[in-house]
Amino acid sequence: MVRHTLQTLGPNVLATRMVRDYVQGLYAPACRSAKALNDTHAGARELAAWKAKVRDAWGGVRVDHVESSGVGDVPEVGTTLELRAFVSLGELTPDDVDVQVVHGRVGLDDQITDTSVVGLRHAEVYEGGRHRYVGEIKLERPGPFGYTTRIVPRHRLLAGPAELGLAVLPAAGAGMDDGDLR
């Protein structure tokens, strides 16, 4: 049992992998952002003004509805799930946000684990600050899967999408699915 555990879990808890993930996901983006801000004060002023604008307008951001197609009642590996997200951005523009799909396995507690993130493409503008975003997910693993959408701030000078601590998830009943991939 110990040998099996080390073989299956060992690669997931290696220090070199964790350091690589921190460097690629946190330290390198923070370094790039810091360099862009420290070259001139104009970048810092631009980012500060943008952050204030986003914080003030964030209350008007929401996921209105999510639709999917391309997968039948019994999803199969290799199928492509097509997604359409209808969102309201209020006073913000598509350049201010990233609309994403977070997908992965669904555990026994109905939580999405082993996640991947896919950015959706802006497809159409409607009246009243509403927009349609589209994208695809290729279903590559068997077993229970699920997805949700989220909206996070996006700016070229941010170190990462979590920097502002803002994210919008769909309200209950906004049209998400999960299924059992065979």
Image (cartoon, rainbow, N blue to C red):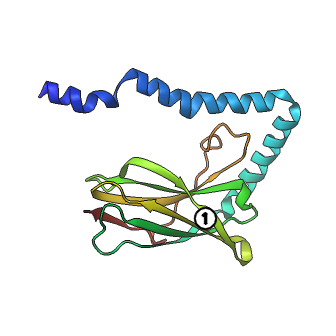
Looking at this rendering, what residue extends furthest in the front direction? 78
| Residue toward you, 172 or 16 | 16
Q: Amino acid at mark 1?
A: Arg
Q: Which residue sits at x=29%, y=53%?
A: 109
Q: Quadrant of residue 128?
A: bottom right
Q: Is residue 69 above or below residue 96?
A: below
Looking at this rendering, what residue extends furthest in the bottom direction? 127
Q: Position of residue 173 (x, y in %)?
A: 45, 72
- Which residue in the structure is indicated by mark 1? 62
Q: Quadrant of residue 93?
A: bottom right
Viewport quadrant of the N terminus: top left
Question: Dot 1: few (<14), some (14–19), or many (≥20) neighbours within 10 Å?
Answer: many
Q: Position of residue 149 (x, y in %)?
A: 51, 60
Q: Which residue sits at x=49%, y=63%?
A: 136
Looking at this rendering, what residue extends furthest in the left direction? 1
Is residue 180 shown left or right of residue 52? left
Q: Check disc 1 and report its element: helix, strand or loop.
A: strand
Q: Position of residue 110 (x, y in %)?
A: 31, 56
Q: Is residue 27 above or below residue 105?
A: above
| Residue toward you, 125 or 153 | 125
Q: Which residue sits at x=41%, y=73%?
A: 70
Viewport quadrant of the C terminus: bottom left
Q: Position of residue 101 (x, y in %)?
A: 50, 58
Is residue 170 shown left or right of residue 31? left
